[in-house]
Image (cartoon, rainbow, N blue to C red):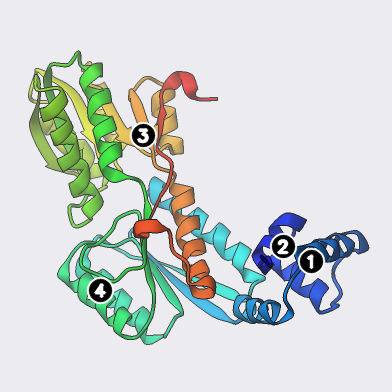
Amino acid sequence: MPFTIRQIAEIAGVSRGTVDKVLHGREGVSDEVRARVEEVIRKADYVPNRLATELSQSMKERRIAILMTPLNPFAEKVREGALAAAKELRELNCSVDVLIMREFREDEQAESLHQIIDTHPDGIAVMALDGNLTREALRRAEEEHIPVVTFVSDIADTARICFVGQDIPRGARTAAELLARAVGQKGRVAILHGPISMSAHRQRIESFENELSEGFPQVQVSGFADIHDDDETAYRETGLVLEDRKLAGIYVTGAGVGAVARAVKEQGRNVRIVCFDLTRETERLLREDEVDFVIDQGAFGQGREAVRLLWNYLVHKTVPKEGRFYTDTTIYVKALLK
């Protein structure tokens, strides 16, 4: 079976742009690399008309728009991943615009999406807030034949082609087991969660509670607080849940972990903490024994793969099975840090 231009580039260890230069006799390729690519092409039994189609599709000018929720340490790493993919695609004539929302507000996201659609991009990737205004905007994208990938947090009842992110229920159940065992499989714990307008946070709460109920019935959730992924709110709400003098553990579903740990430390409490995402901040907290476990969901990979998968769909019309691409879930403790 004839190879594609992508496979030839991978086998030769070069970019698709380099393969294109070799095929068209353009400058900018060393003799050694040119010979290597030509040898791969010869052995690959490339069909000329298939080659022409592949080249025309891969080198066609395209533009992808990325819409992200407000930045925090996790979102910064997601953005880095998206920008890395953008750099890779630049030589394939694809530009990537990364746009950042000011607040976690669905009306702002919907308005931003409509503005993006007005510019007629070839594809959109969005960290979706799960609400009707966002849903309506994504339905408009579908009507205008603009493919959409969601990443980090998904949204139901839309025609998005793929979700890129953590297997959220699995990650939350892992967090429940870790925290339950850390508190001796009995006692009271609190859930400090991010904006529930994101389905990811709702799923992290639901799956965490289900795992405790099924596997650790003597561990009870005694407090909830929406900390809005905001340090000031996280610090204040942690102080309130710590009024429960028998509180043994805290589960943080999003950002604000540093403020949570600071409030616990200032009160001199022995409260176990489980959170998500290995950032500079959470790594420091692990090293200083201020959090017990960090469950990483591959923030960089989520940003990078959202862009890559969207481009692959535009060029090859391929999507992962079942419309989902799960990044790796990795558990970190202090001893595993370098």
Frontmost of labels 2 and 3 is: 2
Query: Residue 312 bears which disc, if any?
Result: none
Give the residue number, with chain letter if any, for mark 3: 295
Q: Sequence-wise, which precedes: disc 4 or disc 3?
A: 4
Of the residues shown, which amino acid type is indicated by label 2?
Ile
Q: Sequence-wise, which precedes: disc 1 or disc 3?
A: 1
Q: CA distance from mark 4 to mark 3?
A: 30 Å
Give the residue number, with chain letter if any, for mark 1: 41
Q: Sequence-wise, which precedes: disc 1 or disc 4?
A: 1
Q: CA distance from mark 2 to mark 3?
A: 37 Å
Q: Secondary structure at mark 4?
A: helix
Give the residue number, with chain letter if any, for mark 4: 110
Q: CA distance from mark 1 to mark 4?
A: 47 Å
| Quadrant showing the N terminus | bottom right
Neighbor class of circle 4 (other Cα within 10 Å; few <14, some 14-19, many 20+) is many
Q: Position of residue 61 (x, y in %)?
A: 59, 82
Of the residues shown, which amino acid type is indicated by label 1?
Ile
Q: CA distance from mark 1 to mark 2?
A: 7 Å
Say if residue 58 shows up in the picture.
yes
Q: Are marks 2 and 3 in contact (CB under 8 Å)?
A: no
Q: Nearer the viewer, residue 130 or 268?
A: 130
Relative side of 187 to 265, left or right: left
